[in-house]
Image (spheres, rainbow, N blue to C red):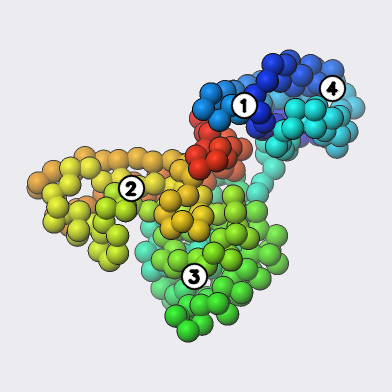
Amino acid sequence: MPDSMILTLSCRNRPGIVSAVSTLLFEGGCNILDAQQFDDTESNRFFMRVQFNTVRDGVDLLALRASFAPVAERFGMHWQMRGRAEKRRVMLFASKFDHCLADLLYRWNIGEITMDVVGIVANHPRSVYAHLDFGDVPFHHVPITRDTKLEQESQLWDLVRTANTELVVLARYMQVLSDGLVAKLAGRCINIHHSFLPGFKGARPYHQAHARGVKLIGATAHYVTSDLDEGPIIEQDVERISHRDSPEDLIRKGRDIERRVLARAVRMHLEDRVIPNGHKTVVFTD
């Protein structure tokens, strides 16, 4: 049995949910360490994240899950229960801009983000990333052109599926995924982009922002959907810009924002702090 467990759930709001959950955990020999909940009055849905441990010998994880199933069925819950230290299998996709890739690998190596990196996929050869230490993580060069996109996406999906990947992170991966691949990765693919999109779409967005004299730049991490750069938002951040900043300054500051926003989004997803809520998300912060 893990040192502590995390239960997340969402369902239509009705009286008795919290009582049923806490009673089940108490009777199962567990103690609640932290509990967060949210009642969305607009959608009439209830969201909850509970961290708990066991206080009685002989508590079995599978049995605890089985005992919770009737409660979940009674309330029509979408739910999961897992060990807090359980590592998710994560695959990182990258392109020429490698600052997000390097940052995630650093945070993983020092233990700040708990995950198993099962592969790195890039549309550029390994030599582009010679300055990065990938250790024993498999590297896959999958070049994509307009003519080979569908065939190469089939290879991408094979890599994801064969590695039993639970989360794909687009760490500034500069390729638009097809609707078919996006559907296969629904709810388990995170992207990062400039938060001043869609105002400055296309090439050289920081140069466009500089030309318009923006006073704020930022970044947004979100789940990938078929609506380009419009998936449910997980995390955002901004930074002030002045008239003294050149386009190169904006790019430098933008890299910093992108790194920290993507890292926070990945960590919150892996810690089961993000629960989908239609086109939005409920994020229980630590």
Along the line of sight, the residue nearer the viewer: 29 or 49: 49
Looking at the rendered structure, the secondary structure element under dot 3 is: strand
Residue visible at 84% across and 18% down in the picture: 27
Q: Position of residue 271 (x, y in %)?
A: 60, 38
Give me the C-alpha separation between circle 3 and circle 1: 39 Å
Alpha carbon distance from label 2 to label 4: 45 Å
- In this rendering, would 191 be left or right of 55? left
Which residue does the image show at 26% across and 41% down from the upper left?
A: 239
Q: Which residue is mark 1?
A: 46
What amino acid type is highlighted by mark number 2?
A: Ser
- Label 1 or label 4, whichever lies nearer to me, is 1
- Label 4 neighbourhood size at 10 Å, few (<14), some (14-19), many (20+)? some
The amino acid marked with disc number 4 is Gly
List the residue tagged with mark 4: 28
| Residue at image point 20% right, 54% down | 209
Task: Judge from the rendering whether residue 99 lies leftward or rightward of residue 143; answer left or right.
Answer: left
The numbered dot on residue 122 is: 3
**CA separation in Å, label 3 and label 2:** 24 Å
Q: In terms of secondary structure, where does tag 4 sit? A: loop
